[in-house]
Amino acid sequence: MSATIQLGVQTYFSPDDDTQQVFLDLLNQAQQTIHIAIYSWHLPAAMAVVKAAIARGVKVYLLMDHSQSTGKYEAPEVQDLVNLGAVVVIGTSRLHAILHDKYAVVDGLHVLSGSWNFSLSASKEANFLTVVSNPDFAALFMANWQRQHDWIVAHEPQYQTLTAPKGGA
């Protein structure tokens, strides 16, 4: 039950569409960079795709919510991302609430966004995600990503506790 609209816009609805596979396929396309801003991350299949992306030289950057990144299932995956070489910044919004974004930007061209969290349960619930392939649209998301990154780094050092193992990834 997906819809394709002109200008490279595709929208998917879970549980009818395989939204998890749409996300994995987008990550698999990455040649240079993956930037993610996400509230909740617990998706083992995405971990495998990110690991493969890093192995082929893709740079991976994540902004993650402080309250979710320390959860029972999330914390080990977040640490694994750091161990793999991903840059992970954890924090809140500028209003000191939660970082509730749900988007990924691949190669500064493709944007995946919507209500869909990057979690096992998201595809089983009523959620949507939209993929837009447009450099101007991606630039808007990248500007937002950078603004949030810079604010978190400047104002929330208390959440930046993860370190990669000695000797690199």
Image: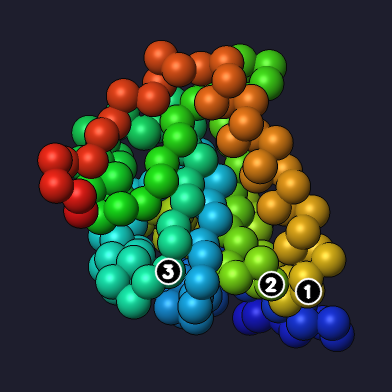
Mark 2–mark 3 Cα distance, whole angstroms, equals 14 Å
Q: Which mark is residue 58?
A: 3
Residue at image point 36% right, 33% down: 69
Q: Mark yes or no: residue 44 visible.
A: yes
Mark 2–mark 1 Cα distance, whole angstroms, equals 5 Å
Residues at marks 3 and 1 touching, judged by CB atoms closer than 8 Å: no
Q: Position of residue 85 (x, y in %)?
A: 30, 53
Which residue, given by chain and number where applicable, does mark 1 sit on? 134
Residues at marks 2 and 1 touching, judged by CB atoms closer than 8 Å: yes
Say left or right for 126 vs 7.
left
Q: Position of residue 158 (x, y in %)?
A: 41, 14
Mark before the other along the chain sequence, 2 or 1: 2
Q: Amino acid at mark 2?
A: Leu
Element assignment for label 3: loop
Q: Position of residue 139 (x, y in %)?
A: 77, 59
Mark before the other along the chain sequence, 3 or 1: 3
In which quarter of the view is residue 126 placed? bottom right
Q: Amino acid at mark 3?
A: Val
Look at discs 3 and 1 and give the one toward the viewer: 3
Residue 63, above or below 1: above
Say left or right for 79 vs 60.
left
Residue 2, above or below 20: below
Which residue, given by chain and number where applicable, does mark 2 sit on? 109
